[in-house]
Amino acid sequence: MRIGELAKRAGTSTRTLRYYEARGLLPARRAANGHRTYDEDDLRLLREIRTLRDFGFELEETRPFVECLRAGHPAGDSCPASLAVYRRKLAELDDLIGRLADVRDQVARQLAGAEEAAGEAAAPRCAMTP
Amino acid sequence: MRIGELAKRAGTSTRTLRYYEARGLLPARRAANGHRTYDEDDLRLLREIRTLRDFGFELEETRPFVECLRAGHPAGDSCPASLAVYRRKLAELDDLIGRLADVRDQVARQLAGAEEAAGEAAAPRCAMTP
DNA sequence: CCTTGCCTTGACGTCGGCGTCAACGCATAC
DNA sequence: GTATGCGTTGACGCCGACGTCAAGGCAAGG
């Protein structure tokens, strides 16, 4: 399988595959004419990468999963290094979600206060609004 | 007040202030020698910007607030355009937090599953662990 | 022979919000 | 005079994960 087909089957671009190769994440064998050659295992590795990236993992964070698969394990997360990344990511997510929730509440309060102020301005204090 | 003092009082850098000026967000008057000159109102505007940026607002999103203050309103969020930004930001935050929560749960499930698999591998099925 | 379509490498562009020089001017303090 | 410390403009660097050209090679089909 050449780069174009792999890209299509994984729903990504050839540029992305070349980028991954440059990063040492998904090296390719070469055909006699210099064209990159991939097999079904490479597709599995690539899908692992793409899935993790869809989850918001940085490219480097997918490396343990890829190496785990390449080492022959049934799943990318069958290795301790992968679990460590999971845990770190979980902590990061909890932290981030917590901070965003705080911000969300602050913004909500600001909005409520500003809307109220605007309302009072429109209908001056103690107006007899029915 | 010159740029260095304003930066210090707002807890930011002169580079940032020049950047804001280049963006048309915080224009400065000039002294005879060409030095930028700011007053207390500029400090208020700058603090408004910084507060919003700390909340994760993009620079452009702070513009309505700044213009609102500059128009003479008591608060940056006293204008409809500012309220619109608040509402948009609130929706964005809710959406983002929701998606992150989904990802968090997916990662947690993956982690749990992988830990269980690792545990079973260490202590093969039906081991008599006391 | 020529077009089409795949592939190759190389290199610059993108996005935001600045950081970090470089090279210079002007003013006060010593 | 000169060292210090402020200011000025201009321009490149950074971060990640690619997108997007450019220029060229090689094979099959009409």
Image (cartoon, coloured by chain):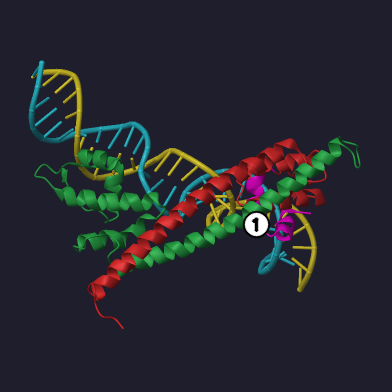
Chain colours: A green, B red, C yellow, D cyan
**Image quarter (top left, top right, bottom left or bottom right) of the C terminus of chain B:** bottom left
Which residue bears the numbered disc 1?
B13
Q: Position of residue A110 (x, y in %)?
A: 72, 49
Q: Nearer the viewer, residue A6 or B96?
A: B96
Looking at the picture, which amino acid does disc 1 mark? Ser
The magenta span reads: B1-25
> Does the rendering let one see residue A37?
yes
Q: Main secondary structure of the magenta part?
A: helix
Most distant residue in the bottom direction: B130
Residue that appears at 38% across and 60% down: B109
The answer to whether residue B94 is magenta is no
The answer to whether residue B23 is magenta is yes
**Image quarter (top left, top right, bottom left or bottom right) of the N terminus of chain B:** bottom right
Residue that appears at 20% across and 51% down: A42
> Does the rendering let one see residue B27?
no
Tell me if D27 is positioned left or right of C6 in this view: left
